[in-house]
Image (cartoon, helix red, strand yellow):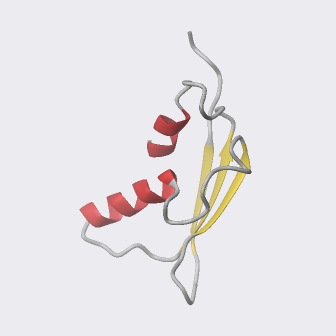
Amino acid sequence: VALNLRNDLFVQVVSSKTGAPQIHVVGEGAKTLPRSSNNVVFKTIAFVFKKAKQSVPALALTCVNRIPTVRGLGSSSAAIL
């Protein structure tokens, strides 16, 4: 089965006194997904920076989610990719 669903991700480096990520979720999971460093998208970004031996800058993420969560349609895989 092929579905025409996708998520969009917008990432911006911001100045922050705390360095904590600013995470906004729109659409699927907007009320339930974490907005902290426990967010899967942020964890993936942090992993890539670590592999490159770079520190993670303060980031603002906007996740526009269209893939339903907790239904086996690949929302976690899309977040990691």
The part of the image, by quadrant, that contains residue 5 is: top right
When the figure is inspected, residue 33 is found, relative to residue 16, above or below; the finding is above
Left/right of residue 33 with respect to residue 77 in the rendered view: right
Q: Which quadrant holds the C terminus?
A: top left
When the figure is inspected, residue 75 is found, relative to residue 71, above or below; the finding is below
Which residue in the rendered view is the most extreme toward the top?
1
Which residue is pictured at 62% across the width and 33% down the height?
6
Q: Could you say where residue 51 lies in the image, as x and y percent from the top left?
A: 25, 61
Q: Which quadrant holds the N terminus?
A: top right
Left/right of residue 17 with respect to residue 26 in the rendered view: left
Which residue is pictured at 43% across the width and 58% down the height?
43
Which residue is pictured at 64% across the width and 33% down the height?
67
Q: Could you say where residue 64 lies in the image, as x and y percent from the top left?
A: 68, 47
Label count reads 0
The part of the image, by quadrant, that contains residue 29 is: top right
When the figure is inspected, residue 30 is found, relative to residue 56, above or below; the finding is above
Q: Could you say where residue 53 lies in the image, as x and y percent from the top left?
A: 24, 70
When the figure is inspected, residue 5 is found, relative to residue 48, above or below; the finding is above
Q: Could you say where residue 15 lies in the image, as x and y percent from the top left?
A: 58, 84
Residue closer to the observer: 34 or 27: 34
The part of the image, by quadrant, that contains residue 3 is: top right
Which residue in the rendered view is the most extreme toward the bottom?
17
